[in-house]
């Protein structure tokens, strides 16, 4: 899953340039570790321009989470759909989709798990957690819709497994081991 790099020569708005820069920095290092001065310098904008588009860092964090949701959920749905269309079982398709993400050089875990962990330090904690919950709910709906798994209990268990796998992959555990375990448990849960 690729985002448009903030320094790309393609003409983008100043607001988008700031948002893309924030995305790259917040996703790779967290929003708590990324100060406004760092964002301004990396975006190559003035402080006045920055605050004209994002009057507070909190508003930028929320914009980042909405943007991240949009690009990730579109990637996830398209990738899962592609694997299913290729004839893979739901267990294999889910595993293959996650594998593609985990081995990506841009992988830094789940932005929403990471944001939830950092939310306590922000005055917008409840807004952050609401966006994160909504992200997980939409992910769950896509899984249920595309895999045709009607049992909500099974889909909930799949989501728990996925979140655990994401954390293990983020910690640097062997990707093949994680994916093989997921594939095995997904197959058991889905009766494949």
Image (cartoon, rainbow, N blue to C red):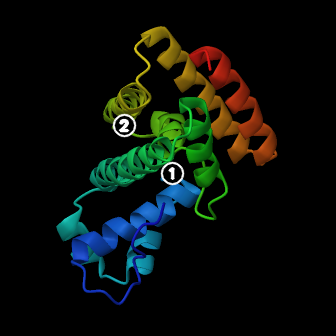
Residue 10 in percent (x, y) is at: 30, 86
Q: Secondary structure at mark 1?
A: loop
- Which of the 4 quarters of the picture holds residue 105? bottom right
Identify the mark at residue 128; answer none if there is no mark.
2
| Camera-side residue of 85 and 173 | 85
Q: Residue 155: x, y in percent?
A: 48, 19
Q: Does 3 sit left or right of 27 as displayed? A: left
Q: Are marks 2 and 1 in contact (CB under 8 Å)?
A: no
Q: Nearer the viewer, residue 9 or 49?
A: 9
User: Which of the two marks, 2 or 1, is nearer to us in this view?
Assistant: 2
Nearest to N terminus: mark 2 or mark 1? 1
Indicate which disc residue 137 carries: none
Instruction: Name which residue lies at 25% across and 86% down.
Output: 11
Farthest front residue? 87
Residue appearing at x 76%, y 47% in the figure: 175
Q: Which residue is mark 1?
A: 32
Q: Residue 32's x, y, as percent? A: 51, 51
Asked if residue 163 can be seen in this view, the reply is yes
Q: Residue at x 39, y 31 (%)?
A: 129
124 lies left or right of 118? left
Q: Is residue 35 visible?
A: no
In the rendered image, the residue lying farthest to the bottom is 9
Q: Residues within 10 Å of mark 2 (few under 14, many from 20)?
A: many
- Quadrant of the image for the C terminus? top right
- Please, is residue 88 above or below residue 43 in the view? above
Residue at the spot 37% in from the left edge and 84% down from the top edge:
44
Corner quadrant of residue 148: top left
Tell how many labels: 2
């Amino acid at each position: 899953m690729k985002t448009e790099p903030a320094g790309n020569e393609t003409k983008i708005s100043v607001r988008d340039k700031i948002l893309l820069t924030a995305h790259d920095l917040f996703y790779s290092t967290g929003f708590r570790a990324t100060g406004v001065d760092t964002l301004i310098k990396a975006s190559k904008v003035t402080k006045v321009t920055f605050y004209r588009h994002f009057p507070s860092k909190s508003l930028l964090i929320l914009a980042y989470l909405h943007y991240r949701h949009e690009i990730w959920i579109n990637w996830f749905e398209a990738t899962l759909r592609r694997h299913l269309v290729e004839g893979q079982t739901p267990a294999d398709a889910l595993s293959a989709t996650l594998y593609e993400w985990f081995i990506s050089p841009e992988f830094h875990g789940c932005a929403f798990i990471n944001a939830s962990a950092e939310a306590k330090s922000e005055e917008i904690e409840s807004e952050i957690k609401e966006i994160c919950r909504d992200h997980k709910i939409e992910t769950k709906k896509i899984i249920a819709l595309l895999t045709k798994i009607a049992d909500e209990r099974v889909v909930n268990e799949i989501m728990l497994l996925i979140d655990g796998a994401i954390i293990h992959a983020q910690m640097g555990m062997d990707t093949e081991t994680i994916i093989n375990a997921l594939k095995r448990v997904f197959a058991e849960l889905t009766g494949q």
